[in-house]
Image: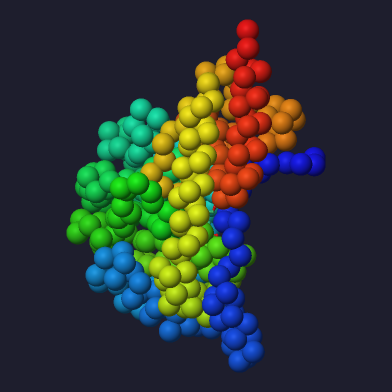
Amino acid sequence: MENVINFGLGEPDFETPEPIRAAGVAAIGEGFTHYTANAGAPAVREAVAEKLRSRNRLSSVDAESIIITAGAMGALYLAMLALMEPGEEILASDPGWTNYEGQAILVGGRLIRVSAGADLDFALSRAELEAAAGQRAKIVLVNSPANPTGTVLRREQLEEIADFAAERDLYILSDEVYEDFVWDDAEHLSIGSLPRAADRTITIGSFSKSYAMTGWRAGYAAGPTEVISSMVKLQENIFSCASSISQMAAVAALQGGRGLLAPMLDTYRDRRALALELLSEIPGVYPHRPAGSFYIFADISALGESSEQFALELLEQEQVVVVPGDAFGPGGEGFVRISYATDQSNIREGMARLARFAANRSAP
Ligand code: PLP
């Protein structure tokens, strides 16, 4: 199709900032192009540990408790492989990011969907966790800020999850790839910084979203050293190590820190405000106001269609891409995910088309 407005993107539309690209080029120029240690180059592990201590308040983390991976996906996969025996369960919110289920299946485990609907602000609750957990539950997956809903869990919600995990002796996998994308007065809190969760949490982070580095494939996990050392052994047999070049670029990203992030975050903030304002003017489309990430989960059920049908017809009639909510589990039915990782002119044009489409739908 031509002339498509794409609100389907799950990645930043920015270029990787120049100092990060320069560090990658320098790594190549200096011949830093060989295997690194399986766990990652020592300087990179140290830089990530320092970031997690100072920004995420994971006070007991050191370089030994870090593994550098091929994106957060590498970290999530290695963690599930290290922790889960065949048939064991990982509890994750419904709706939730699609790839968790694929990875659980790959390691012979099962993903159990824990209902976290709009009435709960799409947050995992203790009551729903208890209702869903079976005898073979092993891991609770926490994704805050969340894809696709943007939900940012508050301290008391994280404490509930930590208490549940401690009582049931479960690990917590905390996927924090959207940690920098928090809006209004929301704050990102790492569940691993809570005393009850500290010794059972594997914190997973990434350079992909914050620093517009999706193609570099750089991420990490931090957690109990016995879990990390299992992940390191598995990494030897699967990936060997994360790209040496990307590891050097990741250090430059951490050194640049807020200075590199701030201009991009300001742009996302403006886009979010614009997208929410325009959406709020469309009868029949009700955006759930997201506190985090760069997605808006919008309720389209008043327009009387399945979310898949809605997305297909919107594409065919108006050439606008959104992701049907049921792609993220049955709990996403009736919603579509709109990514605002695209510029303001696309947002204006796409919303005008969406408004026309919705008006045609709701016409008698
Ligand atoms: N976790 C979530 C919730 C995501 O949405 C994504 C990418 O869309 C990832 C992890 C993957 O991140 P990475 O590029 O670091 O593998």
Report whether residue 29 is seen: yes
Report whether residue 334 is seen: no
Q: Nearer the viewer, residue 229 or 135?
A: 229
User: Splitting the image into 4 quarters, where does residue 60 fall?
Assistant: bottom left
Using residue 288 as the reference point, say whether residue 212 is left or right of it.
right
Quadrant holding the C terminus? top right
Query: x, y (%) of residue 44?
Result: 45, 79
Q: Residue at x 34, y 39 (%)?
A: 124
Q: Nearer the viewer, residue 82 or 49?
A: 49
Query: x, y (%) of residue 20?
Result: 54, 75
Q: Is residue 72 above or below residue 134?
A: below
Q: Is residue 220 above or below residue 316?
A: below
Query: x, y (%) of residue 289?
Result: 41, 36
User: Splitting the image into 4 quarters, where does residue 310 fall?
Assistant: top right
Q: Nearer the viewer, residue 54 or 230?
A: 54
Using residue 202 as the reference point, say whether residue 232 is left or right of it.
right
Q: Can you name the residue that lies furthest to the left here?
A: 195
Numbered label tally: 0
Query: x, y (%) of residue 274?
Result: 50, 41
Q: Residue at x 35, y 39 (%)?
A: 123
Q: Residue at x 39, y 78 (%)?
A: 47
Quadrant holding the N terminus? top right
